[in-house]
Image (cartoon, helix red, strand yellow):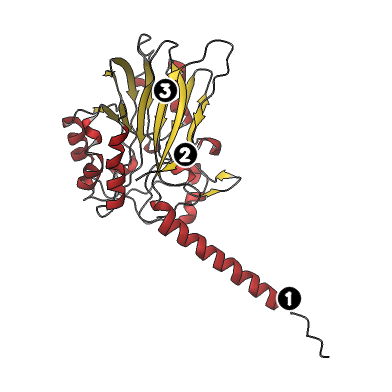
Amino acid sequence: MTTPAPESPHGSTLRAAAATAAAGAVGLTYASVIERRLWTLRTAELPVLAESARPLRILHVSDLHMLPGQRSKQRWVAALRALEPDLVVNTGDNLSHRQAVPAVLRALDPLLELPGMFVFGSNDYYAPKPKNPARYLMPEGRKKRIHGPELPWEDLRAVFLERGWHDLTHTTNRVRVGGRTVHAAGVDDPHLGYDRYSAIAGKPDSAATLRLGLTHSPEPRVLDRFADDGYDLVLAGHTHGGQLRVPGVGALVTNCALDRSRARGASRWGAHMWLHVSAGLGTSPFAPVRFACRPEASLLTLVPRPAAGHHNRSRCNAGSDVG
């Protein structure tokens, strides 16, 4: 009987490398072709209202990063109108192309029939540019801003305002929503350093049903100011939920100074305030991948805070596919 020759270490290494490359190719295909189109509705219940208040439902939409031909995304977002939220909040980065304004409006048109408010992000003002993907994983302080051509954000803003949505960029507003008063305020994009919290600083209306803050990028310096002034809830986007998440680990980066554990979803910020970060619905056209981080919109049901002595916790749904 002939004894087989022992396998060389070199051959074993080659096979392992080939298997790793094949697994990587499968993962990349899934992330770039399948998961980034798995539109998902996430739900959460947040105890932020006064004890006697009726629940308030907010649809939080962010980071569309729309391209003109993304019809599936446009149809899915438009269908969210059937949820009948009390209020729609858009936290920016709607555009990824100079000709994408009509596509964004096709997506949001049914939602513009509802009370709404917005702030803009960096990719409303500037188009994305090709970058080394490795830059995404670099520490935030070491990244140099690279802006593409200016985008027609003013056209988008004009339609939002014409349809009745409120621009909260460096302003405060008291909005009536379903017979209730929402005191809302927002800042321009902190990711670009455009935020000027001093323009809205001060205690919000203590008689309002909800004191709501808006920012595109959830920079801690801005969140601290909202919390110190006494806001109940701040909504933000920008992080894409990490965009690439490792099961059991979570987001690798947030693309801002926010800690990775808060890259998406609801969390407490200080003793009183809640933060909700949307993982968003899009990607840069130059990095069109999502892994373990489906594109999402969020339906938030705001309920009264628990009575003293009870635990103050949110209830979050991991998400469900709709449309």
- Distance from label 3 to label 1 (Cα)? 60 Å
Instruction: Point out the frontmost of discs 3 and 1.
Output: 3
SS category of the residue bearing label 2: loop
User: Which labelled disc corresponds to residue 238?
Assistant: none
- Asked if residue 231 is positioned above or below residue 122 in the image, the reply reads above
Q: Which of marks 2 and 1 is in front?
A: 1
- Residue type for callout 2: Cys
When asked about the image quadrant of residue 281, the answer is: top left
What is the crowding at mark 3: few (fewer than 14 residues within 10 Å), some, or many (at least 20)?
Answer: many
| Residue name at image x 33 percent, y 17 percent | 183
Question: How many C-alpha atoms fall within 10 Å of the one at disc 1: few (<14), some, or many (≥20)?
Answer: few
Q: Which of 19 and 284 is in front in this view?
A: 19
* Residue type at tag 3: Leu
Quick one: label 3 or label 1, which is nearer the N terminus? 1
- Return the residue at label 3: 302
Q: Name the residue under label 2.
A: 256
